[in-house]
Amino acid sequence: MKKLLEISLGIVTSVGGFLEIGSIATAAQAGADFGFQLIWAVLLGGLCVIFLVEQGGRLSAISGHTVTGAIRERFGFNYFILLFIILSAVTLLVLSAELGGVCIALEMSTGIRFQLWAIPVALVIWLILWKGTFGVIEKGISILGLVTISFIVGAVVMKPNWRSVLSGAVPSLPTSEKSHYWFSAVSILGASISPYLYLFYSSGAIEDEWDEGYIGVNRVIASFGMSFGSLISVAVLILGALVFPPRGLHADQYSQLALLMQDAFGHTGFIFFVLSLGISCLGAALEITLQMAYFAAQGFGWNWSENLPPKKEARFSLTYTIVVILAMLLVLTGIDPLQLTIISMALTAATLPLSTVPFLILMNDRKYLANSRNGWFSNAVVIVIITVAFVLAIVSIPLQILGGS
Amino acid sequence: MDLVRDCLDKQLVDRHGHKMGRVDGIILEVGDGRIPIVTAIEIGPVCQASRFHPMFAKVVKRITNRFGVVQKDPYRLPWSKVIPAGIEVVAGVEAEDTPVLGWELWLRKHVIERIPGA
């Protein structure tokens, strides 16, 4: 009974916490520019995330290590510090994008410029981390995030041609704007396969004191939670494909995103969109900030737990404080949050092998996982998808910057 | 025992389970014609930085001195006090009696405790 409750709660939090500015923006733009043609990228990213999250949870439940801690142990200090620097830089951009997402939601509902919201929003995030417990952050905010299911309802209400939707699930070559098509695919993959997601999940497994008995729970939560989550991203893409092209829009300005649910629900749709954007970005911002502090604390061996008072873990709490301030400063510079989002998602895709390759090696290490190591199928899925994301990123990012097509 | 596999970079906890950092270095005594003997493990930011590049170790040392943090040199824990215990390494001492928490305590006193609600 207890496990059933944990499974339901786990799935609910994974679904509610899945969407964030990255998946909303990349899916909406892909829909606007290429109709249903890029649905495959959302599904491919979702599939990879199911496997990575399941593996992160399994590593922690079996070995008692977090992924970060295990990477430091297995690959030494120097690899850890390189990964720490690169991943922190990219993740900080992603965090600023999420913070910007909350600010945009507030701008949409109040009319006050998003930069002006940066300080109050950062303060709220910091206060929740300062005072809250892991449960509040993981479960509370994610349950509120269930409002993002409105995207699925919206997509169904719009009665898309389901046959075309299904054909988009099969990868196909672009007919025009080739480099932009592949760049969009890369951004979608980067938005789905964020390393912070499985690193955070692995920290969560330790915070929630998982052991071998949780292998089944973990598998169910990862597969159902992440599949439903990906369906919400697909719904955003469908809405993007139905809403933007008739208006001649490309969803390249964040104000346009508010139209996503307008055709389905009218003004209520606008309210649902603002709530979805605000809550999902707030949830993601909290998780990312916390994950950056976990990353430092676990790698350096400090005290870390969101359940301890800040005084008991000065370095940990100082780290998230600095992280929130840096992200806030980046939003204050007035960089367009939508562009920041797309760029940071593509960069995430380009840096994926740095964290996933050592992670996969760990997942095959008898010393950590004994008989619960990865099978060939789990290895193959992750290797193939990460390679695709990486190669596409390396090829398409320079092309996109040069503006070729 | 495999020093690199079972000791280096592992989480170090004191005898009460309090986290003391990670095993950042291992000290060997090398004499003429003798077999090298493990004498201690090292913990601390300076040791971490020196693993990356000695130049960084100098910089970290300067910063540490500047702020008057207790731990100036890497802390050496005698090998006799080191107990490998599965996924962790246990130190037969109390964390508070060693200088490894230098930065933690300095930040607690000068920064974190000054923020309301800590």
Image: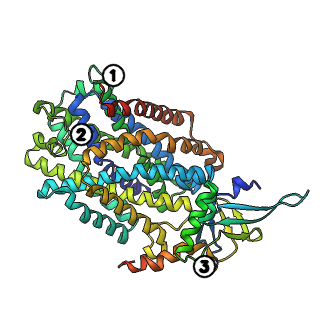
Q: Quadrant of the C terminus of chain A?
A: top left
Please tell me in which quadrant of the rendered image residue A187 appears: top left
- The one nearer the camera, A396 or A240, is A396
Between the C-alphas of marks 1 and 2, the distance is: 20 Å
State the SS at label 2. helix
Q: Is residue A1 visible?
A: no
Q: Is residue A269 above or below residue A126?
A: above
Q: Amino acid at mark 2?
A: Val
User: Picture coordinates of residue A282 (x, y %)?
Assistant: 29, 57
Q: Which mark is residue A172?
A: 1
Q: Which mark is residue B96?
A: 3
Nearer mark to the viewer, of 2 and 3: 3
Mark 2 lies on residue: A236
State the SS at label 3. helix
Q: Amino acid at mark 1?
A: Ser
- Label 2 lies in what chain? A
Q: Say whether marks 1 and 2 touch (CB < 8 Å).
A: no
- Label 3 lies in what chain? B
Left or right of A42? Residue B64 is right
Q: Amino acid at mark 3?
A: Glu
User: Picture coordinates of residue A311 (x, y %)?
Assistant: 45, 76
Between the C-alphas of marks 1 and 3, the distance is: 62 Å
Nearer mark to the viewer, of 1 and 3: 3
Q: Is residue A41 above or below residue B48?
A: above
Q: Residue at x 33, y 31 (%)?
A: A402
Q: Is residue A385 above or below residue A316?
A: above
